[in-house]
Amino acid sequence: MGRSGKPDIGYRLVDHIAHVDALVGALGLSEMVIVGHDWGVAIALDRLRRFPDQVKGIAFMEAHLRPLAGWEAFDPDGRELFQQLRTEGVGERMVLQDNFFVDTLLPAALRRELSAQELDVYRRPFPDAASRRPLLRWAREIPIAGQPADVADLMSAAAAHLESSSVPKLLLHASPGAIVNPSTVAWCRQHLSALTVVDVGGPAGHFLPEDRPTEVADAIWGWLASVR
């Protein structure tokens, strides 16, 4: 996504994971602290599960840590939106033709107004329908009610490993947040060891690095001092 190349591939979660594997191998990385947001967290947690000796710490924010049991996991507005995105034909029109994620959802989800110049930076990597296919695929990869089955299995295995892992962990959340709500924070506190939890304040929604950049950076730098 973003400014990455957009070859003609499926852009499934396993494709993203394979590309990260190739990047890590090409760079020869063996001791990593991984910071993930949203779908990047699913990739990071799978990496931790498969290569626990290579990960020294993991920081994560605004992400589903486990598959969603069903559509009831969404608020009514989110449920309707993602059902539309996952409907054949409707999702294609919204994302590929209307550039919904960049032109509509991003400005609406941020807690500050983007300037025209800032929004142009976000638009630049997605000038046409072909370049927007990764965004549509992402919306259809989130495992809801067991589908897609392979993604649900992968995320379940990663979450189970996260519960047993002793690697240092940093959970960043905000007010009011979006995906990570008080129940998510409570679950993490109850089930995860070696966990640091930082509330970066608000107002902030899903896009924490955009809404609270200084607070996010300060929290990560402060936590890194404790990672050995």
Image (cartoon, rainbow, N blue to C red):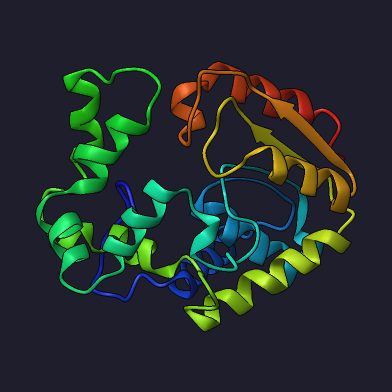
| Whether residue 5 is visible | yes
- 107 or 70: nearer the viewer: 70
* Point 51% across, 49% down: residue: 38
- Does 200 appear above or below 165? above
> The C terminus is located in which quarter?
top right
Q: Quadrant of residue 180?
A: top right
Q: Quadrant of residue 196?
A: top right
Q: Indicate the position of residue 124 as horizontal and vertical percent values.
A: 18, 40
Please state the total of marks drawn on the protein image. 0
* Point 83% across, 60% down: residue: 163
Q: Indicate the position of residue 113 as horizontal and vertical percent values.
A: 29, 18
Q: Indicate the position of residue 49 as horizontal and vertical percent values.
A: 74, 68
| In this picture, residue 17 sits left or right of residue 154 | left
| In this picture, residue 52 sits left or right of residue 138 | right
* Point 48% across, 64% down: residue: 71
- 154 or 124: nearer the viewer: 154
Residue farthest to the bottom, as pictured: 149
| In this picture, residue 158 sits left or right of residue 128 | right
Q: Indicate the position of residue 67 as horizontal and vertical percent values.
A: 60, 66
- Does 78 appear above or below 114? below
* Point 25% across, 24% down: residue: 118
- Does 199 appear above or below 74? above
| Whether residue 51 is visible | no
